[in-house]
Amino acid sequence: QDAGWITPPSIHVVRNHGAVPKLSWAEHKLKITGVPRPCEVSMDELTSGKLAEVASFPVTFICAGNRRKEQNMTKKTVGFNWGCAAVGNSVWTGIRLCDLLNSLGITKPSKEHRFVHFHGPLAELPQGKDGSYGTSIDIGWALDRERDVLLAFKQNGELLTPDHGAPLRTLLPGCIGGRMIKWLCNMHVSDKPSENHYHYFDNRVLPPHVDAELATAEGWWYKPEYIINHMNINSAMFEPRHNSTFPTGGKHKTLKVCGYAYTGGGNMIIRAEISLDSGKSWEIADLTRPEDEIAAARGTDKHWCWAWW
């Protein structure tokens, strides 16, 4: 909150499944296969603008577990206790995935070109066949320019830091962080979705009666309808702080109440309402949405950023 609407990398949410790998801008290459023109692309080539135009715009990033502590108080999940600060909003710079795919010969979905796979360094993590963190998205999603999928190399105008995926990461606006790949090493276009361990065993919402043991025994992890991709609508308070008090009769006559709200799908937060009587009545709060002018300048109705109320 104190940092403002744009979050500096130093306090932006970080979620890793293992140690941060040591990758070099000068030596790193993105290997791209399953396309008509497979290649290995250096960072200098990727950022030159020759393969695809470089673009910058703000996007709110969340971990799917944002506010999970409250959920765990109701029913324990396999995830740890995130508070309400697993969120940040930065200006990301990169090349659009749709432009890169077009330059490599894929302009529309086909039977053999149905999914785009991404994964990070091999042998990075203890689980899975190759120890990589990977996932995939539909080719229609990847080719849709309005979805603004980026291969990003800058955050707030500076090259990515190691914690945030340096030198290259995917950035999927409106999507949970678990579907974005930091330290991107490989991209592959296929007729089938990813079989990476983390694509299946991370970021699923299963029915209440299905715990991890039952999910494994009955194959619930592999049911595509339970995957989490897009952010759900959410809101939390900045102030008053949890368990804070407001003494009556003191010198302060008013109490500031404020917070944030976000949603997925490129949808716009249109209002925030607050109740002071346990939901019996509601008042509309003042809403700050700096992205409106940015979206208008970009010629889109997509809103990828949080609003403050």
Image (spheres, rainbow, N blue to C red):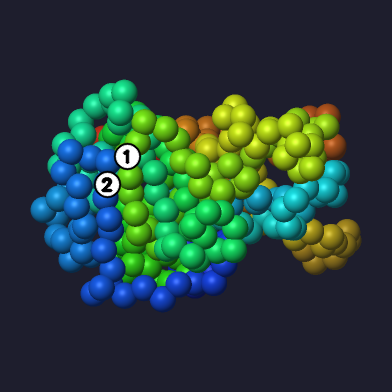
Q: CA distance from mark 1 to mark 2?
A: 7 Å
Which residue corresponds to the image point at 15% horizontal and 50% vertical from the top-left? Answer: 51
Residue 90 x/y as whole percent: 42, 58
Asked if residue 65 lies left or right of residue 47, the reply is: right
Which residue corresponds to the image point at 84% horizontal and 37% vertical from the top-left? Answer: 277
Residue that lies at the very extreme toward the left in this rendered image = 50
Mark 2 closeness class: few <14, some 14–19, many ≥20 residues within 10 Å = some
Secondary structure of residue under mark 2: strand
Residue that lies at the very extreme toward the top in this rendered image = 111
> Does the image show residue 179?
no
Residue that lies at the very extreme toward the front in this rendered image = 129
Looking at the rendered structure, the kind of residue marked 2 is Thr
Name the residue beneath numbered marker 1: 189
> Does the image show residue 49?
yes
Q: Are marks 1 and 2 in contact (CB under 8 Å)?
A: yes
Looking at the rendered structure, the kind of residue marked 1 is Val
Name the residue beneath numbered marker 2: 33
* Image: 68 above or below 299: below
Which residue corresponds to the image point at 46% horizontal and 41% vertical from the top-left? Answer: 194
Asked if residue 42 lies left or right of residue 207, the reply is: left
The foreground one among 201 and 97 is 201
Residue 31 appears in which quarter of the rendering? bottom left
Residue 70 x/y as whole percent: 79, 49
Secondary structure of residue under mark 1: strand
**Which label's residue is closer to the chain start, 1 or 2?**
2
Asked if residue 76 lies left or right of residue 54, the reply is: right
Residue 204 x/y as whole percent: 64, 39
The foreground one among 278 and 152 is 152
